[in-house]
Image (cartoon, rainbow, N blue to C red):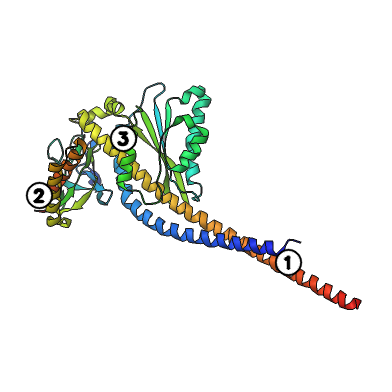
Amino acid sequence: MPNLKLIAMRLKSVTNIQKITQSMKMVSAAKFAKAERDLKAARPLGIAAQQFYKSADIQSDKEQPKEIFVALTSDRGLAGAVHSNINKNIRAQLEAKIAAGGPSAIDNCKIICVGDKSRAFFSRFFPKQILMVGNEIGRLPPTFNDASKVANAILSSGYDYDTGKLLFNYYKSVVSNETTELPIYSQELVLSSENVSVYDSLDADVVQSYMEYSLASLIYYCMKEGATSEQSSRMSAMDNSSKNAGEMIDKLTITFNRTRQAVITGELIEIISGAAAL
Amino acid sequence: MAFRTAASFARRMMSTSTVRSSEMSFTFGGPNAIFYSGASVKQVDVPSFSGAFGILPNHVPTLAVLKPGVVTVYEEDGSTKKFFVSSGSVSINEDASVQILAEEAHKVEDIDAAAARDLVAKAQAKVAATSDEVAKAEAMIELEVGEALVAASA
């Protein structure tokens, strides 16, 4: 018969866990409301920033273009599947390349880990591909400043990538988000693309400034989407935790009461049989 | 190349190369606020590093970088709205859509002239005080924005 004290300890700790996950859910709900408002303002910006690249329809014609993957995650866990979705997506892409072209196929691919969650994952699986790591993300809502710091870091990394992908979670609704990628290109690729020659009076200066700014805008947009997805996912994860903890508490309470009654019954039997023996 | 005369397509004209309508799909905003999203306006004046220019519907595709200054939007009903932008980019695409993405965009009515003059004075002091190249460049940018703010709020 399990010890009464052990059950009581377990009950107390599960109750604590339930309180903690409840409060985390409340906090996430508040942060989510703000993030969703910000996202409403940021979505038209994101769509507008992609317009140029969509209409220019730039292709890379190199055999093995130098690629860069930017994994936009954050430092904070307990957020459901958001971080692992991005990490697994990148890993699947890299593994497909290895399957097609051998282990050296990914020498041209580098990863920029924005957020500790992606850094932890990739330092285990693809440590050689990590180019840069960013942290202190996830505590505060992302600002354009943060996005421009990331953009700056990418552009000044010294790695001349040809194409790149920004991976983030597109927010669809409170219960669903989708891992999406946005393409980014290098300046040479944009300048040499034939669709771009339609654009009038472009000099290298203007294109460079435009591309730097649009990279920051795109990263800002992806960060906003990612933040909203993360908060909504954390909200549901914590809600599920609280419900599960609640169920465990019910079961444990029943076991506790049964054990308590059994102990009392046992004592009674001892007393009665002791009295009867006299 | 058929010329459509049905009423709903009356405004569409087929050019030899691309389909253009006589309106532009105008998106203008910054991380702090979006002012127009896919709206149809008559003309937009933008301050850019390669000179201030006006964008009418069917402008040739181009890219430009915004200078601190005022973006003037002439709407369909004849009214004009002015916005201050600190920097950003302009892109006009083949399908006649215009995107102005500003780092910060505010209505000129929201600018506090006294605070703007304050900013100019402080920036001038910084420019005079620093000798480090990078810091000096940053201070000069601040000065440019401040002066544009004062000009916009006048």
- Residue A259's disc is 1
Q: Is residue A39 left or right of residue A9?
A: left
Q: Is residue A142 left or right of residue A1?
A: left
Give residue B49's position: percent from left, percent from top: 15, 37
Q: Nearer the viewer, residue A183 or A252?
A: A252
Q: Residue at x 91, y 76 (%)?
A: A277
Report the chain holding disc 1: A
Q: Earlier in the sequence, mark 3 or mark 1?
A: 3
Report the chain holding disc 3: A
Of badges 3 and 2, nearer the viewer stands 2
Q: Nearer the viewer, residue B19 or B73?
A: B73
Please tell me whether residue A236 is drawn above or below residue B14 in the rendered image.
below
Cα distance in 3D space between marks 3 and 2: 34 Å
Q: Amino acid at mark 1?
A: Thr
Do labels 2 and 1 touch, CB within 8 Å? no
Q: Quadrant of residue B109?
A: bottom left
* Extreme-right residue of the structure: A277
In this figure, which residue is indicated by the disc labeled 3? Answer: A53
In this figure, which residue is indicated by the disc labeled 2? Answer: B151
**Mark 1 residue element:** helix
Is there one chain holding both mark 2 and mark 1? Answer: no
